[in-house]
Image (cartoon, grey):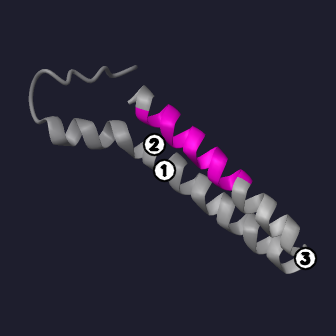
Amino acid sequence: MQEQMDFTQGSILKKLVRFMLPILAAQVLQAMYGAVDLLIVGHFGTTTGISAVSTGSSVINVVLFTVAGLSS
């Protein structure tokens, strides 16, 4: 069965935390993915590759955070 959350009644904090945990987990995993990607390219690549991965990761994070913020 699918449970619906009613934010108009009861404790808002518990419901808000349950709502935001998946979004927070996705953002943390995205940041970890960028960090690991940067470590791998830093180990095997050149400074140009490191710069490209760093810039690309930052752009993707801004887009992800914006979309997650607007959706919540």
Q: Earlier in the sequence, mark 3 or mark 2?
A: 2
Query: Which segment is the magenta one?
Result: 56-69
Q: What main secondary structure does the magenta stretch of the protein show?
A: helix
Q: Which residue is farthest left?
A: 10
* Amino acid type assigned to the residue bearing label 2 in the image: Pro
Which residue is more in the foreground, 48 or 25? Answer: 48
Q: Quadrant of residue 71?
A: top left
* Amino acid type assigned to the residue bearing label 1 in the image: Ala
Separation of marks 1 and 3 at Cα, in angstroms: 29 Å
Q: Quadrant of residue 63?
A: top right
Residue 49: within the magenta?
A: no
Residue placed under numbered mark 1 in the picture: 25
**Residue 21 picture location, percent across and down:** 39, 45
Depth check, mark 3 against mark 2: the one in front is 3
Residue placed under numbered mark 3 in the picture: 44
**Residue 10 picture location, percent across and down:** 9, 30
Residue placed under numbered mark 2 in the picture: 22
